[in-house]
Image (cartoon, rainbow, N blue to C red):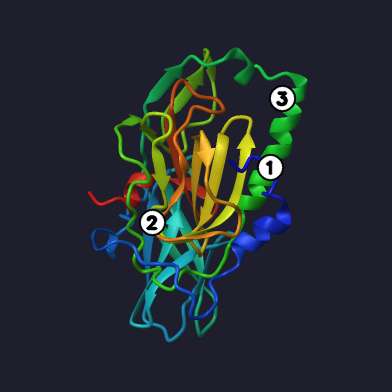
Amino acid sequence: MHWNRRNALHRLLLGAMSVAPGMSMGAPPAAAADPALPRALPVPGGIARIPLGAHAQRPLAHAGEVPLLVIGSPADWTALVGIPLAAKAGRAALRVKTDGPEREVPYTIAAKAYAQQKLQVAPRTVDLSAQDLARHERERVHQQQVMAVFSSPMPNAEALGMQAPVAGPRSSSFGLRRVFNGQPRQPHSGMDIAAPTGTPITAPLPGRVLDTGDYFFNGGTVWLDHGGGLLTLYCHLSAIDVKSGDTLRTGDRLGAVGATGRVTGPHLHWGVLLNRTMVDPALFLPA
């Protein structure tokens, strides 16, 4: 179990390296190779698919100063925009640079209302002691560094359909407005999948291990980098079977389900990050 601090910044940067020419990162199973995935759902917490047209080279696209994942081929490029849960409904735009001058491409964010969930957890994970708060602040800074990583898109970046990292019912849904011990907190930014402690967790796409660690809220944690600002997150693990810099294929084991960190029982919290924004993982799964 890799509980040491091998998630130091130099290991993080190792995980961010793009795949060397000729190196295979594996291929997703045929069922996942769906060019329509991720599905477009331009709402807070969703994804906008913005057509960019035909260009000889992959266009550069940004939301503000944050680079975006652009998929496709010279015949037809598409920008994928992760929309923050805090985004307001209405007009938005991204900046695109191709062969000519930079241009602005508008799109519209629709409104979406999320339900509320009330949970009872250990009081020390809601009303933090000075020591726990200091630990959380250190970990938060480190996690922000991890989330800012942008490596080269994968060679098969047009096929982003994922397989679920663990089988089991969803015990909680993305976007829920969460209330812990009567105190409102940030919305739920991932998918919770209920499974017994020790159930294997596997990579949903080829990727490189970006970070591992034992964190105050997330417990045993693994981050995978799939290229182009697409990262996935696995929390509350009872075992971690990988280390930073490891290259995984779809279906490779990375750890086991647990109940570490702030939890009410054993489950996997699975998050998907796109352009530094947590988005609904269900949009990457076959319907």
Is residue 65 at least partly visible in the picture? no
Task: Determine whether, in the image, residue 194 is placed left or right of residue 248.
Answer: left
Q: Are marks 3 and 2 in contact (CB under 8 Å)?
A: no
Whole-percent x and y of residue 53? 36, 77
Under mark 2, the amino acid is: Ala
- Distance (Cα) linking label 1 and label 2: 38 Å
Task: Determine whether, in the image, residue 166 is placed left or right of residue 182.
Answer: left
Residue 4 bears which disc, if any?
A: 1
Task: Determine whether, in the image, residue 223 is placed left or right of residue 110.
Answer: right
SS of the residue at dot 3?
helix
- Distance (Cα) linking label 1 and label 3: 18 Å
Whole-percent x and y of residue 72? 37, 73
Is 190 in front, or is 263? 263
Mark 1 surroundings within 10 Å by alpha-carbon count, few (fewer than 14), some (14 through 19), many (20 or more):
few
First in sequence, mark 1 or 3: give its number.
Answer: 1
Residue at image coords 54%, 49%? 223
Q: Which residue in the structure is indicated by mark 2? A: 48
Is residue 145 at least partly visible in the picture? yes
Residue 279, above or below 99 = above
Whole-percent x and y of residue 175? 41, 35
Residue 59, above or below 172 = below
Is 21 in front, or is 252? 252
First in sequence, mark 3 or 2: give its number.
Answer: 2
| Closer to viewer: mark 3 or mark 2 | 3
Under mark 3, the amino acid is: Asp
Q: Which residue in the structure is indicated by mark 3? A: 132
Residue at image coords 29%, 65%? 35
Residue 143, above or below 39 = above
Residue at image coords 49%, 14%? 120
Residue at image coords 54%, 70%? 152
Mark 3 surroundings within 10 Å by alpha-carbon count, few (fewer than 14), some (14 through 19), many (20 or more):
some
Under mark 1, the amino acid is: Asn
